[in-house]
Amino acid sequence: MNYDRILIRYGEISTKGRNRNKFVDKLRKSVRIALIPFPKAKIEASRDRMYVLLNGENGIEIIKSLKNIFGIQSFSPAIKVERDVEALKQASLELLQSLFKAGQTFKVTAKRSDKAFELNTNEINDTVGGYLLSQIPGLTVNVKNPDINLRVEVRKEAIYLSCETIKGAGGLPLGSGGRAMLMLSGGIDSPVAGFMAMKRGLEIEAVHFFSPPFTSERSKEKVIDLARKLVDITKVSMKLHIVPFTDVQQAIREQVPENYTMTSTRRMMLRITDEIRHNREALAIVTGESLGQVASQTLESMYAINEVTNTPILRPLISMDKTDIIKIAEQIDTFEISNRPFEDCCTIFVPASPKTKPKREKVNQYESYFDFEPLIQEAVQGVEVLTIKPGSDKQSEFDELF
Amino acid sequence: MIYFDNSATTKPYKEALHSFVTVSSSYFGNPSSLHSFGGQAEKLLSQAREQIAKLLSVKPNEIYFTSGGTEGNNMAIKGAAYRNRNKGRHIITSSIEHASVYNTMEELEQEGFEITYLPVDVEGRVSVMDLERNIRKDTILVSIMHVNNEVGTIQPIEDIANTLRNYPDILFHVDGVQGIGKVPLLIHENRIDFYSLSAHKFHGLKGTGVLFIRDGARLTPLFSGGNQERKIRSGTENVAGAVSMAKALRLTFLKQETGISPMEKIQQLLRNRLEEIDGIQVHTPIDYAAPHILNFSITGIKSEVFIHALEQKGIFVSTTSACSSKKKSPSRTLVAMDVPESLADSSIRISLSYDNTIEEAEEVMKAMKQTLNQLRKVMN
């Protein structure tokens, strides 16, 4: 017996009040994008749940592509049955027969959102369970830890049968929380921060600082590959803003005492990102900062750096340990890429002993001797914008060799 | 010329050669060099890795470039044995493995490992029950080939995988050299930890290969050096080889889509015609055999003589396997299959590629019959 639909349960969306439809619409959009390779599949969305009607498409493959969608708490392959006790018994039998292997145990878990149905939950459990036991030799009941848990859900329009619940990606639907700029270096943390921000429903545009010849094409390549991984997860294209940063970085080297260059560099990056954010009408900046991880991420440092803007700076990793961050990086497949050994804008010109407790007054004083504004504007003007499109096959100049 | 010795090696695709020449001449940088020329080479290498991973449905970081099947098998078996020698020293393999596995096992035996060589039935297949019976507490590795190189028998990899699922600590190596591109095999679905390939068996170039190492499976590297290939296989990468291999694998998989059933027809035709001839015994089993190999013996005629006689007619076939054909001992595989030694001594292997045709098969059969008649006259 084949499943004919996949039932999708909303996570937090179900706690939303009047805005719920907006969230559901965003989720439906994500699901629609994920279903592009399966043209016959159809979506049915209601306030509480969504169904993907398979119409003959491969359910296993569809589940694979639904697993990455934010805003889905769990899903179950299911069968729709008309509201009739005999029909329910027959469909349950067929479903269980298709799954049952000798020696397995089962239980029936009925749920009745529509109390008008002729049997209550206990009666459904008894009726269906008893019928299955009488029809399938060797089948036994195990209420605590069954091999097969047959869920019977009685709803107004029909009864749904399912046997497994698959965990979804959780979070909120992509784009339901507005747009933010992600400061994407080549490191391990920032792609993870981007992933977590997207999971909370933010639409992300990435900003990367590029300082040729101090950083190489390969470090840029690395960031493009990282962005591509994030796009692979959501299947929605992402803008990547590449900022020419060499002149600003050189000016800092010349104007600011060595132990303050790091602080100043971060302040300039934040100013530039904030300008781009403004131009792109985004409302926040996301960084991969984790408290105390490096000199720039002490509370004193953040206090000194954050002075240049009052835009919300979101730091999804702020209280996470490195090992936990690495775990997520491995999950989302960015760890390998981040580990490629190329200099990026944050690793060049690292002072021997950066200030871990910089003072706002001092950094302001050092920066006051030189007008950075024209250089910042120049950098913003010179931004190269790439659109990273979904589809893991990147076009390469070498394609004819493959 | 009719080339029917594709299990020994295949003719490189001209497209693969073109890639090799282009990369070697225009992008000869060292992928480890920092400059952009090195960057191009690195990009080529990683694109090759990605393409091969995609074709095999595995992750790019599970692909390690090697010099071929022998190296991949050695790396996997010795690497896994050395890495786990403190957990246990028992390894299970079969008695019909390729020399690169079999001899590696014999070496490990010298070093204090205990090897169980599973026997095979008359069709050349190991028994999964037998395998399970031989599993011990100190078993660290099971190494079974996918397709036998001499007779073409397909080993029950799926069933072995199902058994090994109950023993999650035992590593599973599959020598995939003869199976790739001819007999589909799902790597992750069959809980395979190591899987080796050689490009020249699928129209790539000699000296290039792949070892798949499942993410999380660990082994001790055999080479010390510059830590290329994530420290597992040091040595400057053969970029041109890797690119041409990626291309050859893609083209082979493309041909596989429509090529298997015509190939089976050719094999069937050869089998039918051979079985009509007196004194010929076909060793390749009818079921669960790869479509490209057909192994048989001719009573009373030494295989070497027969091969040279065919060669004069422009037809190229093999005795048993190319790797052991210079040795004078009878085929280990055939002996394990209970073929009498006298017959094993006179065995011939025909092995096909997707480019061979039914006409070629007819012609080969005609030539074989003629040759047999001539030789029988002389030798009787």
Image (cartoon, rainbow, N blue to C red):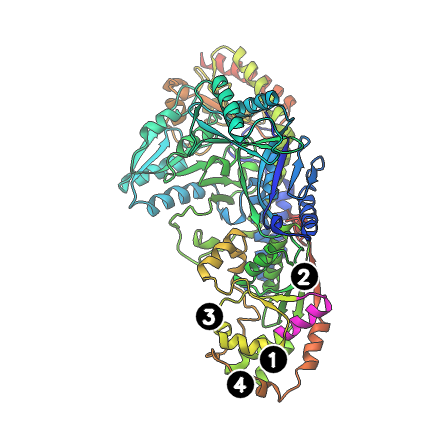
Main secondary structure type of the part rendered in magenta: helix
Numbered-mark total: 4
Could one spot residue B289 in this view of the protein? Answer: no
Residue topped by disc 2: A179
Q: Give x and y (percent) for residue B106.
A: 32, 37
Q: Residue drawn 64% across and 22% down?
A: B358
Pick whichever, A185 or A100, lies toward us. Answer: A100
Give residue A292's mark. Answer: 3
Residue identified by numbered label 1: A250
Between the residue at mark 3 and the residue at mark 2, the CA separation in whole angstroms equals 27 Å
Say what amino acid the circle numbered 4 marks. Answer: Pro
Q: CA distance from mark 4 to mark 1?
A: 12 Å
Q: What label sits on residue A257 in the rendered view? A: 4
Decide: few, some or many residues near mark 2? Use Cα within 10 Å; few <14, some 14-19, many ≥20: many
The three-letter code of the residue at mark 1 reads: Gln
Residues in magenta, as a range:
A270-283
Q: Position of residue B198 (x, y in %)?
A: 51, 40
